[in-house]
Image: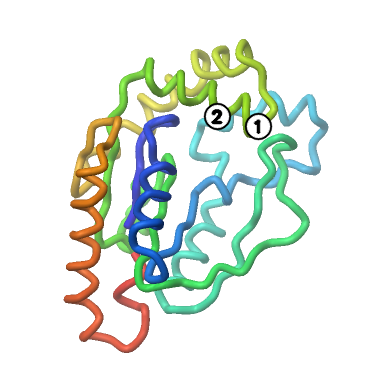
Amino acid sequence: MAIVGRSGAGKSWLADQLKARLGPIATRLSLDDFYRDRSHLTPARRARINYDHPRAIDWASAQRVLRDCFAGRPARVPRYDFKRHARRAQARVFRPKPIILIDGLWWLRRPGLRRFFALTIFIDCKSSLCLRRRVARDLLARGRDTSSVRRQFRNTVEPMSRRYVAPQARWAHLRLQAPVSQLQVAELERKLRERLQHEVPKTKDFRRNTH
């Protein structure tokens, strides 16, 4: 299942909530892992890159991982350090489970990736709420200051969201309005369990159950 929406919409929160409810039959994958490695650039040049444009993602790696998961194979997933804008030295081994919860800004933009997802969700969220959430996250987890977060939100996050994130709503099976309620989370859990019950008898591996 793919969860998309603008930065701060609550994609990661929803994926975490579902993973906690589904327990051992579910795992999670984030598009954040696939930002391109910028370790070969100076810190000043890294700071000038537009990380809110889809070209900031290593799409070849993302597709390779989805293809491995679709086939039921373990995949090597990069680990990204947002404070340095660079990948960490060692990748992690990602082992697919019957349900994979995948969140990120742009998963639905590419037809070649959309085919992997049996269920897709787009989260609508007001700009003011997204900004508040983004400030809180970046100050705590990414070593940023409030002024730089607000400046980036105004200069690149919002324009790129309107251009590249919002249009994906047309490809979503479901649209939710943030904040997503626990009742909605419970209903999504029910849908996923129901879908899994219908899919499992058809195959002995994960090829139909990894999305």
Q: Amino acid at mark 1?
A: Arg
Q: Quadrant of residue 82?
A: top right
Is 52 rendered above or below residue 98? above
Do the residues bearing badges 1 and 2 touch, measured as CB atoms within 8 Å? yes
User: In front: 43, or 131?
Assistant: 131
173 over 122 or under it: above or below: below
Residue 63: x %, y % from top left: 48, 61
Residue 142: assigned label: 1
Q: Secondary structure at mark 2?
A: helix
Q: Position of residue 172 (x, y in %)?
A: 23, 46
Q: Position of residue 90 (x, y in %)?
A: 74, 61
Q: Residue at x 63, y 34 (%)?
A: 141
* Element marked by disc 1: loop
Camera-side residue of 125 and 13 = 13
Q: Identify the mark nearer the N-term, 1 or 2.
A: 2
Q: CA distance from mark 1 to mark 2?
A: 7 Å
Amino acid carrying mark 2 in the image: Arg
